[in-house]
Amino acid sequence: MSKNKGRAGSHTTIIEAARLVVKLLEKKGRVSRGVITAGVGARTQSIKVTPLSGALHVMVVSKGSRQELHVYGITMSEAKLILTSTEFPGYLINFPSA
């Protein structure tokens, strides 16, 4: 596996709503799985992407939980292209305004 692609860190648990997100983002960059918060009362599934210094912060929210991901080696425009594909029809996807 390339040094710049795949999984980063030792945390391996992924919530169901984030599985496809992680799978697609790992094809282009490194994904560090982060904190899972249970008991979230969201009405819809959503993905929120915000830029960090040297990475992207991706928050995936489902009806029962929320997971934070940090993505390395992918630009905001690449993430937008990946996450706005037709594979996420039930998700509300948020990117920062330009």
Image: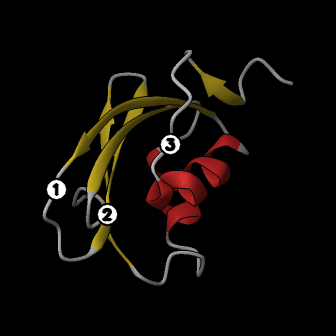
Secondary structure of the residue carrying tag 1 is: loop
Residue annotated with mark 2: 62
Q: In terms of sequence position, does the residue under pointer 2 or pointer 1 come before the other? A: 1
Distance from label 2 to label 1 (Cα)? 8 Å
Tag of residue 68: none
For the residues labelled 1 and 3, say whether their Cβ atoms are less than 8 Å apart.
no
Residue at x 56% of width, y 39% of height = 74
Question: Given the image, on which type of amino acid does mark 2 rest?
Answer: Ser
Q: In terms of sequence position, does the residue under pointer 1 or pointer 3 come before the other? A: 3
Residue at x 31% of width, y 63% of height = 62
Tag of residue 14: 3
Q: Position of residue 87 (x, y in %)?
A: 60, 76
Residue annotated with mark 1: 40
Q: Position of residue 46 (x, y in %)?
A: 31, 66
Secondary structure of the residue carrying tag 2 is: loop
Lateral position of residue 69 relative to residue 74, left or right: left
Lateral position of residue 13 relative to residue 68, left or right: right
* Residue 61: quarter of image: bottom left
